[in-house]
Image (tube, rainbow, N blue to C red):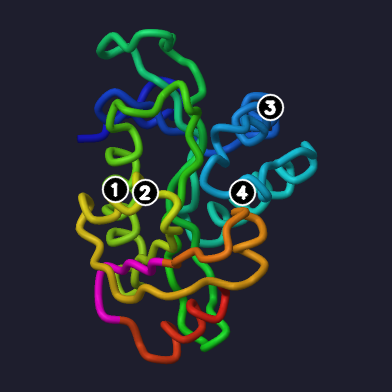
């Protein structure tokens, strides 16, 4: 169950959820720049703070236009997690509404969390909350997740929160180069059967 603090922060379980603000840039960039964050695809490591600025702006537009996007996630006061402090920024995550090249909209589930916070179930809690909010906001829009075979932890999270694997296949040459392997599989999960043209569009994104 969610609760609201005096500052409008939403609390769910051990986590606090806020709409991203410009002041979050430094902490979010530190996570996005961490090599372990991108262990599954090293070539996409974020090295320029402007990339994070643009991403946070995109999330902000999602909140303004659709009432839902990615949150900045912090650790609440509940529980004890070695090496983590109450109020510490753990990363970003949620669902963002995209219009596909085929026409229909999709909620794209994603998150980027501090490696120091891995292993505590935060990603699962975040993903489950995001899917619930997506259903409350635009129930007719499917929730999808695109995962690489080099990131089995994210595939497990997708399954835990009720998404089904709809497609597995070789990804694009660009993605394989960013991963640094000659063969990488793309996995596409969704909370329902997708229209063929939507699935084809997702596959075409590599």
Q: Please determine whether, in this image, residue 187 is positioned above or below residue 26.
A: below
Q: In the rendered view of the protein, which quadrant contains the N terminus?
A: top left
Q: Which of marks 4 and 3 is nearer the N terminus?
A: 3
Instruction: Check disc 1 and report the residue beneath it.
Output: 157
Instruction: Check disc 3 and report the residue beneath it.
Output: 23
Query: Which residue sits at x=65%, y=56%?
Result: 178
Q: Nearer the viewer, residue 171 or 30?
A: 171
Instruction: Check disc 2 and report the residue beneath it.
Output: 154
Cα–Cα span, label 4 and label 1: 25 Å
Instruction: For mark 1, give the secondary structure.
Output: helix
State yes or no: residue 77 in magenta. no
Query: Which residue sits at x=27%, y=47%?
Result: 128
Cα–Cα span, label 2 and label 1: 5 Å
Cα–Cα span, label 2 and label 4: 24 Å
Labelled pair 2, 1 in contact (Cβ < 8 Å): yes
Q: Which of marks 2 and 3 is nearer the N terminus?
A: 3
Q: Is residue 67 left or right of residue 191?
A: right
Local crowd size for mark 2, using a 10 Å CA cut-off: few (<14), some (14–19), many (≥20): some
Q: Which of marks 2 and 4 is nearer the N terminus?
A: 4
Labelled pair 4, 1 in contact (Cβ < 8 Å): no
Instruction: Check disc 4 and report the residue beneath it.
Output: 60
Where residue 53 sits in the image (x, y, percent)? Answer: 73, 42
- Labels 1, 3: front one: 1
Q: What stretch is highlighted in magenta?
A: 187-193
Where residue 122 sits in the image (x, y, percent)? Answer: 33, 32
Q: In the rendered view of the protein, which quadrant contains the C terminus?
A: bottom right
Query: Which residue sits at x=48%, y=27%?
Result: 115
State yes or no: residue 192 in magenta. yes
- Labels 4, 1: front one: 1
Residue 131, by quadrant, is: bottom left
Q: Earlier in the sequence, mark 4 or mark 1?
A: 4
């Amino acid at each position: 169950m969610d609760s609201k603090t005096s500052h409008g922060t939403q609390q769910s379980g051990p986590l606090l959820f806020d709409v991203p603000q410009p002041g979050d840039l430094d902490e979010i960039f530190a996570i996005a720049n961490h090599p372990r964050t991108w262990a599954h695809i090293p070539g996409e490591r974020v090295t320029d703070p402007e990339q994070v600025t643009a991403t946070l702006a995109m999330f902000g537009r999602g909140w303004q236009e659709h009432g839902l996007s990615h949150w900045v996630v912090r650790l609440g006061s509940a529980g004890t997690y070695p090496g983590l402090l109450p109020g510490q920024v753990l990363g970003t995550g949620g669902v963002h509404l995209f219009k596909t090249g085929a026409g229909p909209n999709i909620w794209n589930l994603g998150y980027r969390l501090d490696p120091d916070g891995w292993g505590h179930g935060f990603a699962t809690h975040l993903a489950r909350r995001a899917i619930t909010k997506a259903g409350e906001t635009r129930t007719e829009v499917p929730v999808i997740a695109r995962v690489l075979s080099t990131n089995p932890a994210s595939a497990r999270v997708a399954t835990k929160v009720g998404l089904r694997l709809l497609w597995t296949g070789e990804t694009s040459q660009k993605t394989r180069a960013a991963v640094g392997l000659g063969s990488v599989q793309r996995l596409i999960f969704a909370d329902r059967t997708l229209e063929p043209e939507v699935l084809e569009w997702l596959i075409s994104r590599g």
